[in-house]
Image (spheres, coloured by chain):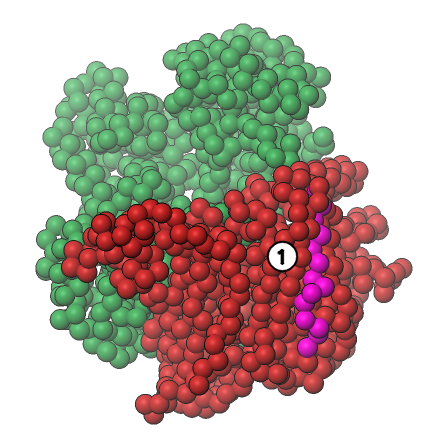
């Protein structure tokens, strides 16, 4: 399914960055297979399917396709993620549902892109589509589509992508029917049931191995985009008891005016995705309803992790989505130090909307390229280059050559930044430096899909967080600071510079093997100064060799420095 | 005079010789891993003995030697390539380590406990120099020669064995890259130098840089091996042409291959589908699934309408290789694949393999884990006394003991456990085939299955039943599958040029110029390889997509000569149709864009003719060797099964299942639903009655 969407869509987010998901559910909305995608787009899709089953009871036919992007009535994450659901029938019996969901290039609302702060309510964020039928019995409902496409910018592009998603659900339907024809209805349904039960047993077994107890974690986003510079906190309490886990977010902040509110379905998805990371990696391919049953998620209504209509939710895949996952990484790393995981580099994107004089067409540019890589895990350094935690490496980046052909911007630098990784016995991946020049017309820029300038995610077992993200525009020799969650205008010849922090570390950096620190110095990931100050490793600047004696002196003759096992999210001190 | 094809695999060097009488003879010798060229000579010596000649006499009569080797692939997969340095556009030296954020290439997103990617060129050997070309091809900043020289000096001091020159937009204008590569070649004696526009002159820097770095990484070892091989062949008086199998399933001279070492990736497996294509042609099946099931892995590829499928989207190990390659999908499912029980309590097979050492439990060596071969033995499919023609005697008791280890926890007796292993590996293979065919938009039921490799013919028919495929073809030289494919291969080369343009504003003279340029290059290369140019067939294609899409579709059928706007219109029509065929919809309302223009130059050659065997009747009984108990589910379990001796079968023989055919290097299993017919070339054609799909 993913392959068909990839090959045929025209939207940079979908085709290049893989902001897209797919899966299969049964007729009771039980999750059968959630192979791949962005957690918020599919793990909780059972809630959307339940909504469709309730609303259309007795009116669901073969050849129907449903569409929704409504966070409240359709349990979707935010408005740009449109999900196409197809019921799968065999001999007139509804047996399964399949879904293809992806971030559309536009969804209407005040600004292009879907990540603009300060919307009055959900309706200001774009067209809000409750579960509706866009195909009935195989026939396209053109008036509904026309109404929808009339409310988005670039309707032609959105139309292409919608067809790509619908085609993917159709291929999935064909494959399911082939399977039933081959093995028979009873066998297929029996296998699904067996698979769910086996997965549940295995997941419960894994949970039983975890030490019973109560573990806590917290994380904050820079602000809610409306009330600037006031962090928004997500706090979780994880109770492991026997073979069950309860995650309680009751201590989190109340819902906000700004666009960071994460509906229950999104909070649920991110919570499960994070807990899956702490299970036996051999189970990674098999998650389904059975993996979900032993895990309960409590999020009080009216909170930032379960807001009431009509709260805005635009930024929640990034802001608060990340925080849900980071707070859980913190709590679960405490419960399972053998599988400790550091926070990843925080998302630092933008939407630039302007005019491309070369083709005399408007454009919207969104880039994942500047994101710092993954956090370290116990046993391994972070994975370089990958984009934000909430995608778990499923979303990818583009090519500079593609960007330059498609947008009137020339890229000047795309490299790792020295000393931008969170230090640790296992260090996080590096942050990046991204510089590009506007060769087009004056343009607008929204930095709604960015954070990590004032608060960052923590490391584990004494690992350090990465440096904060920062950005500026260089214009006429002057540096104009750029901050997250704001709107800017850009001029021709502006140089936009972004410098990001990478992933957080795991373990005390002073226990990192000196040869590894030396490697990092030789490769320019860590400076000689950083090696000395943070890792306690002295590198001779001339020979580039480790000065073992000086290192030992600095590290205290192998005497282990006491470290706090658990970090605490720090806020950058308010400057100036 | 002889024509010889030699495929150097991980375990065996396969050698197939065609003599003047049109008769093929097969030879297998052990691969010599330290210096594989020695194994090639050993194979030739074995052939010479067979023909009663000295090695020199024999070698001097070989007019054509086609050679495939896993050397380059192995060097890449085992991390045994060269120390590579990179000179790149300043500000972009991390492109190949960021690698577009790809992480979950062979793992699930829910597994974060994996080591980070280790780039083939460490960061300190990736050096930026001031230079810049734009996507229009305009040089914005000329190459800074002083910085280039300083970079070279540093790389020299670091002792690099190869240098990859990788600049942004060099596909649009290679001027800066050419200059830098020239300076490297002038200053770095004995260092392998390659530039991205030479390896893959197509846009998208991560894909181009990565491919170029792979080429540099395996370049020195490949050159060394090819030089050594040429030297050894010369020493035994070989005077014919030596041609090397390329990733795209074509062959090339040694000189050209050395320049573009990345084209040696999958040399060998790339030839296998040609064997399938050949079998399809002689038995009139244009759509084929080719499987090559050896000891450790299964290679699957597709032949559609008589053409081998290609892709530019491969990952080899942890590296992105974006040249056009035969689309071979590999999975860890072979005779040596181990059976085990996972944490869900499910029986799994592979990817871990017992390989040749220690080998499956039944080999009687150190191996104690149950493998597919052990299961095959217990089910009676392979003979304990005639494995590899009797070279290895198999031990059933040891096989049973090993299989019992997975049977006990599953509450299965040994025979049931062996069946479970057999079914599991078949399902695994079926999944791989379905994945590949579905991705390419094909329905497997329209295909015939061609089975090669030692283990392929044992599993093929029951695999076909699972997939609903009615026809299975086992080629005459099934266990020397790739070497046989080399006989059926075209000789030629692929060319590509990028020109990104919307169809309605396309500069048609520019396209004509690009094709002329590639054609001139093809003629030149053809001359250099000593082929007469009038035998050259030039096949054009273009990569196209709807405006705004990110992936393209390759459209063939472009006429030769000057293209007109009418030709372009026809091309657009083909594109809409192909898009619908592949993805279930087309969008005529949308503009279309061209990206790459491609040329494939192939030498026309004589049709390959296999020698025929004696014509017999339908009755195969004269080849009956013995009877033994084999397991066939629909017959109710172990039944007395006739076993035929392959070498004694005659054309026209029809063997109803259940039955087994024993050959020296493989066994063909014919289940109940199939009848196996022997064709005049002694290929086996198994067809199922009524094309009924099995249900379990």
Residue tagged 1:
A216
Chain B drawn in what color? green
- Residue toward you, B371 or B508: B371
- Quadrant placement of the N terminus of chain A: bottom right
Q: Residue at x 16, y 70 (%)?
A: B147
Compared to residue A302, the image places residue B9 above or below, namely above
Residue at point 44%, 13% (across, down): B364
In percent of the image, x 54 and y 84: which residue is there?
A: A486
Secondary structure mostly seen in magenta is loop
Q: Which residues are magenta?
A: A243-256
* Residue displayed at 49% across by 47% down: B113
Answer left or right for B114 relative to B672.
left
The answer to whether residue B550 is above or below residue B368 is: below
Give the residue at the far top of this rendering. B626
* Residue B630: in magenta span: no
Identify the element where label 1 is drawn: strand
Q: At which x and y percent is residue B443?
A: 61, 46
Taking B277 as reference, is A64 left or right? right
Q: Quadrant of residue A196?
A: top right
**Which residue is at the front of the view, A175 or B613?**
A175
Q: In the figure, what tint was chain A given?
A: red
* Up-down relation of residue B114 to residue A160 (above or below): above
Residue A245 counted in the magenta span: yes
Residue A110 visible in this rendered orientation of the protein: yes
């Amino acid at each position: 399914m993913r392959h068909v969407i990839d090959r045929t869509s025209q939207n940079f987010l979908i085709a290049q960055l893989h902001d897209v998901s797919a899966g299969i559910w049964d007729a009771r909305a039980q999750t059968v297979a959630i192979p791949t995608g962005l957690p918020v787009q599919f793990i909780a899709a059972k809630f959307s399917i339940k909504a469709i089953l309730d609303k259309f009871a007795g009116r669901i036919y073969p050849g129907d396709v449903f569409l929704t992007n409504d966070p409240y009535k359709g349990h979707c994450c935010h408005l740009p993620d449109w999900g196409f659901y197809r019921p799968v029938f065999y001999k007139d019996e509804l047996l399964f549902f399949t879904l293809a969901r992806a971030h559309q290039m536009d969804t209407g609302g005040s600004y292009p892109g879907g990540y603009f702060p300060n919307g009055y309510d959900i309706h200001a964020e774009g067209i809000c589509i409750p579960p509706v039928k866009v195909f009935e019995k195989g026939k396209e409902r053109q008036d509904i589509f026309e109404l929808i496409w009339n409310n988005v910018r670039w309707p032609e592009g959105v139309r292409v992508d919608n067809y790509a998603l619908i085609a993917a659900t159709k291929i999935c339907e064909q494959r399911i029917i082939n399977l039933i024809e081959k093995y028979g209805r009873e066998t297929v349904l029996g296998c699904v049931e067996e698979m769910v039960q086996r997965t549940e047993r295995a997941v419960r077994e894994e949970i039983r191995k975890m030490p019973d107890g109560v573990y806590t974690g917290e994380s904050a986003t820079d602000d809610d985009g409306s009330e600037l510079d006031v962090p928004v906190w997500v706090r979780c309490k994880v109770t492991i008891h026997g073979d069950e886990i309860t995650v309680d977010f009751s201590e989190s902040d109340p819902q906000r005016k700004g666009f960071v509110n994460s509906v229950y379905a999104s909070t649920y998805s991110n919570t499960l995705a994070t807990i899956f990371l702490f299970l036996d990696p051999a189970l990674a391919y098999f998650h389904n309803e059975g993996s979900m049953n032993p895990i309960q998620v409590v999020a009080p209504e009216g909170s930032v992790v379960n807001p009431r209509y009509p709260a805005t939710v635009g930024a929640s895949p990034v802001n608060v989505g990340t925080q849900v996952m980071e707070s859980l990484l913190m709590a679960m790393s405490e419960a399972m130090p053998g599988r400790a995981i550091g926070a990843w580099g925080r998302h630092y994107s933008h939407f630039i909307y302007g005019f491309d004089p070369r083709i005399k067409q408007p454009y919207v540019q969104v880039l994942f390229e500047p994101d710092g890589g993954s956090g370290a895990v116990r046993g391994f350094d972070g994975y370089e280059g990958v984009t934000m935690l909430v995608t778990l490496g499923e979303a990818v980046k583009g090519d500079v050559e593609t960007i330059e052909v498609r947008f009137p911007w020339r890229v000047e630098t795309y490299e790792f930044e020295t000393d931008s990784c969170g230090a640790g016995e296992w260090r996080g991946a590096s942050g990046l430096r991204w510089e590009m020049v506007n060769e087009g017309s004056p343009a607008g820029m929204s930095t709604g899909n960015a954070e990590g300038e004032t608060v960052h995610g923590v490391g584990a077992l004494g690992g350090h967080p990465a440096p904060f993200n920062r950005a500026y525009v260089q214009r006429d020799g002057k540096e104009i600071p750029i901050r997250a969650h704001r709107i800017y205008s850009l001029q021709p010849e502006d140089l936009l510079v972004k410098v990001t922090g990478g992933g957080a570390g795991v373990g005390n950096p002073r226990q990192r093997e000196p040869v590894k620190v030396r490697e990092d110095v030789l490769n320019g990931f860590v400076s000689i100064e950083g090696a000395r100050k943070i890792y306690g490793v002295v590198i001779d600047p001339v020979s580039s060799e480790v000065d073992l004696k000086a290192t030992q002196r600095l590290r205290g003759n192998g005497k282990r420095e006491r470290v706090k096992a658990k970090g605490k999210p720090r806020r950058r001190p308010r400057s100036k | 005079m002889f024509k010889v094809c030699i495929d150097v695999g991980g375990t065996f060097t396969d050698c197939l010789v065609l003599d003047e009488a049109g008769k093929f003879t097969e030879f297998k010798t052990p691969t010599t891993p330290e210096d594989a060229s020695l194994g090639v000579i050993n194979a030739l010596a074995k052939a010479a003995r067979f023909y009663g000649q000295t090695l020199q006499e024999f070698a001097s009569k070989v007019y054509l030697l086609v050679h495939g080797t896993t050397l380059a692939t192995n060097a890449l997969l085992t991390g045994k390539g060269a120390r590579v340095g990179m000179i790149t556009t300043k500000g972009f030296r991390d492109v190949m380590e960021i690698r577009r954020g790809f992480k979950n290439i062979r793992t699930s997103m829910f597994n974060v406990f994996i080591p980070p990617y280790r780039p083939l060129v460490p960061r300190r050997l990736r050096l930026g120099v001031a230079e810049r070309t734009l996507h229009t091809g305009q040089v914005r900043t000329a190459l800074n020669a002083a910085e280039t020289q300083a970079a070279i000096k540093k790389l020299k001091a670091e002792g690099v064995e190869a240098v990859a020159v990788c600049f942004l937009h060099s596909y649009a204008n290679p001027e800066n890259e050419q200059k830098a590569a020239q300076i490297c070649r002038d200053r770095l004696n004995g260092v392998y130098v390659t530039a991205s526009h030479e390896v893959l002159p197509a846009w998208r820097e991560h894909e181009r840089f990565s491919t170029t770095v792979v080429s540099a990484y395996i370049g020195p070892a490949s050159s060394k091996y090819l030089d050594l091989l040429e030297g050894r062949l010369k020493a035994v008086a070989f005077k014919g042409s030596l041609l090397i199998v390329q990733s795209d399933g074509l062959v090339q001279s040694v000189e050209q291959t050395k320049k573009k070492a990345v084209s040696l990736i999958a040399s060998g497996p790339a030839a296998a589908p040609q064997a399938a294509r050949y079998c399809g042609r002689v038995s009139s099946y244009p759509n084929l699934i080719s499987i090559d099931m050896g000891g450790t892995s299964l290679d699957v590829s597709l032949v559609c309408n008589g053409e081998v499928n290609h892709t530019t989207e491969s990952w080899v190990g942890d590296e992105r290789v974006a040249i056009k390659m035969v689309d071979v999908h590999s999975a860890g499912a072979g005779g040596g694949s181990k059976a085990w029980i996972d944490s869900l309590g499910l029986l799994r097979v592979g990817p871990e393999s017992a390989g040749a050492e220690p080998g499956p439990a039944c080999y009687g060596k150190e191996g104690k884990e149950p493998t597919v071969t052990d299961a095959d033995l217990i089910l009676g499919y392979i003979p304990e006394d005639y494995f590899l023609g009797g070279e290895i005697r198999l031990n059933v008791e040891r096989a049973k003991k090993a299989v019992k280890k997975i049977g006990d926890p599953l509450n299965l007796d040994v025979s049931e456990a062996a069946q479970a292993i057999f079914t599991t590996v078949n399902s695994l293979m079926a999944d791989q085939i379905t994945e590949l065919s579905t991705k390419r938009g094909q329905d497997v039921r329209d295909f015939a299955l061609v089975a090669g490799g030692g283990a392929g013919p044992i599993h093929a028919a029951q695999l076909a039943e699972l997939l609903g495929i009615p026809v299975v073809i086992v080629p005459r030289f099934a266990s020397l599958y790739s070497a046989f494919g080399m006989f059926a291969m075209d000789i030629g080369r692929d060319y590509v040029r990028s020109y990104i343009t919307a169809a309605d504003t396309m500069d048609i003279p520019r396209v004509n110029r690009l094709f002329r340029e590639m054609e001139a290059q093809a003629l030149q290369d053809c001359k250099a390889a000593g082929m007469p140019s009038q035998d050259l067939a030039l096949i054009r294609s273009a990569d196209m997509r709807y405006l705004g899409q990110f992936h393209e579709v390759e459209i063939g059928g472009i006429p030769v000569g000057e293209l007109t706007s009418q030709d372009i219109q026809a091309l657009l029509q083909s594109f809409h149709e192909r898009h619908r065929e592949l993805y279930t919809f087309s969008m005529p309302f949308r503009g279309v864009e061209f990206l790459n223009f491609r040329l494939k130059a192939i030498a026309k050659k004589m049709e390959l003719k296999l020698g025929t065997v004696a014509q017999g009747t339908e009755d195969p009984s004269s080849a009956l060797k013995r009877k033994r108990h084999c397991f066939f589910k629909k017959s109710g379990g172990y039944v007395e099964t006739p076993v035929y001796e392959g070498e004694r079968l005659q054309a026209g023989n029809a063997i109803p299942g259940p039955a087994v055919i024993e050959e020296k290097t493989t066994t063909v299993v014919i289940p109940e639903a199939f009848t196996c017919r022997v064709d005049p070339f002694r290929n086996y054609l198994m067809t199922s009655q009524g094309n009924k799909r099995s249900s379990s």
